[in-house]
Amino acid sequence: MKLQLHIEQDEAGYFVVEVMALPGCLSQGKTREEAIQNIHEAIEGWLEVMNSKSEYSKGELIEVNV
């Protein structure tokens, strides 16, 4: 999966990363590299939570790779 990230440095010097396609999926780090590493964990957590919320009683569930 490829996702676009928005990264900027805040007033305190931390790098803040947001995944534009995943509302509320944010992370930060002291360095750009640390912030990007941290966002990977945040993405995995976000996807796990959203997957656990999606319970379908009818129809067919399929997966696609994007």
Image (tube, grey):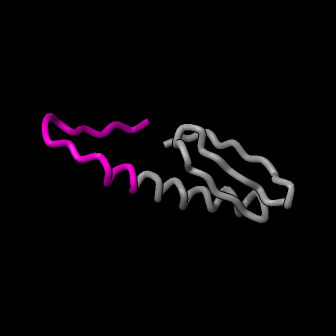
Q: Could you tell me residue 29's position as x and y percent?
A: 72, 63
Q: Position of residue 14 (x, y in %)?
A: 79, 60
Could you tell me which residue is drawn at 14 percent across and 34 percent down? 59
- Which secondary structure type mostly characterizes the magenta part of the structure? loop
Residue 16 percent coordinates (x, y): 72, 53
> Does the magenta segment cover residue 39?
no
Left or right: 11 in relation to 33? right
Q: Spot the residue most to the left.
A: 58
Quadrant of the rendering where the C terminus is positioned: top left
Residue at x 62% of width, y 62% of height: 38
Decide if residue 50 is on the left or right side of residue 18.
left
Please, is residue 32 above or below residue 56 in the view? below
> Which of these two is toward me, 20 or 63?
20
- The picture places residue 2, in percent across and down from the top left corner, at 54, 41
In the shown orientation, is residue 19 left or right of residue 13?
left
Count of numbered circles in the view: 0
Identify which residue is drawn at 71% across, 63% down. Answer: 34
As for residue 59 lying within the magenta part, the answer is yes
Name the residue located 39 percent from the left edge and 38 percent from the top edge. 65
The residue nearer to you, when weighing 18 against 32, is: 18
Indicate the quadrant where residue 39 lies.
bottom right
Quarter holding residue 36:
bottom right
Give the residues in magenta.
49-66
